[in-house]
Image (cartoon, helix red, strand yellow):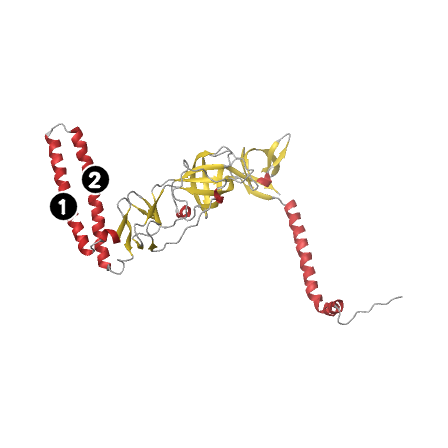
Amino acid sequence: MKRYTLRPDSFLARVLKLLPYCRLPLLISGVLLIFLLLSQLIYTGVSYLFPRVRVVDWGTIEHGQWVDVLVLRSESVLAAPFSGEARLLVEEGTRVRTGEAVAELVSAEARSVLSADDRVALRTITHRLYQIDQEVAQIDKDLAFLAVHNHNLAGEQAEERYLSQRKAQLLAVRNQLVKNAAAVCANWRECYHLVIADQPGIFSTKLDGGEGFNLLEHALPKAPSTRVYTGNRGFSPKVRTGEAWAKMITEYTQTLVCQLPNGVNLEPPEEAVLLVNGKRFKLSFVATDYTNCRWYFTEHTLAPEFLAKRNFSAYLIYSSVTGLRVPTPALAYEEDTGWTVTTAVKGDKRPTGVEVVDMNEQWAIVKGLPLGTAIYYR
């Protein structure tokens, strides 16, 4: 009969040597495991013998879907007339008014020549020249209207003389301002440029390559997330001739293209809610494509969450129901009686029929129960 002996340096021999030192940790681990199993059994037994109680309250059930979002809006790209340096006069993402100066550009050659006072002088003169040009353009429109509709009335002739005099005064002031600017810098038009908003909007230096995209002229890619964008570039004060360096978002309405996952077929809603970074934004439905996989919505806030990225993933809530709410586990269904919940009347528990309006995994909106009714479920 063979006898087997353990070598003192073998792995099993080493484990057996450590076994006396591991008795206490193993014993504690075993006791904890038995305690967890017993606590689970006790919890199950208590839940069975003593069901939960919930009061019918008022609540909302929402149904949603994760979608890929592509943001389209009216944007006007600003290109540099010469190479040099840009200095912002308003903060990034500022909502500006018509005629408000947003930035100034100074050529590389004049950057070391023009002092801070020179820049202020040119900025003031350029801004005033813009205002004069706008006023003269409006006077020309009024004079053209009077020329067509002039009935030789005394009031109309007086107004025409006043407008002509006003135009002459403005042009005289304009000529003097041009001379003042030339005294500051001889070729100031070639080395200084003041960027003024032609219409109200949002000024931004975050260019991502999606500016100017037009749904009427271009077809969207198969999925919004597949479109290649460079990502928002950080603002750099260095600008080059003809290159885009900033943009103006000229409308306060944008279009959101929501791409549903493949295989999801849902009825488009009239209104929806988009969850972005924990915030809720209301959307108005516009249209859907022939596959019903791409929904188009309009959004009116233009919040910073939408300006940060051109395309992103978000949770779209396409339907919601508000009413009397009960936990879904409290519902029971039978072919004969339909949906029922367990209620108590004078201490006696009995099933009560309800009409289920909508439900999800956690809650159900029902009809047929008064508000505040106590229901029981396991």
> Relative to 125, is 21 on the left or the right?
right
In front: 101, or 190?
Answer: 190
Q: How many marks?
A: 2
Q: Quadrant of the C terminus?
A: top right
Residue type, label 1: Ala
Picture residue at 45% right of the left edge, 45% below the top: 311
Horizontally, residue 70 falls left or right of residue 197, namely right
Task: Confirm or deny contact between disc 2 and disc 1 (CB under 8 A).
Answer: no
Residue type at mark 2: give it.
Answer: Ala
Q: Dot 1: few (<14), some (14–19), or many (≥20) neighbours within 10 Å?
A: few
Residue for badge 1: 172
- Residue in the foreground of this view, choosing between 108 and 8: 108
Which residue ends up furthest to the right in the rendered image?
A: 1
Above or below: residue 45 compared with residue 146:
below
Question: How far from the left and from the top, in percent, is residue 42?
Answer: 66, 51
Disc 2 is placed on an element classified as helix
Q: Position of residue 9 (x, y in %)?
A: 75, 71
**Residue at label 2?**
137
Q: Earlier in the sequence, mark 2 or mark 1?
A: 2
Indicate the position of residue 349 as horizontal and vertical percent values: 61, 38
Q: CA distance from mark 2 to mark 1?
A: 15 Å
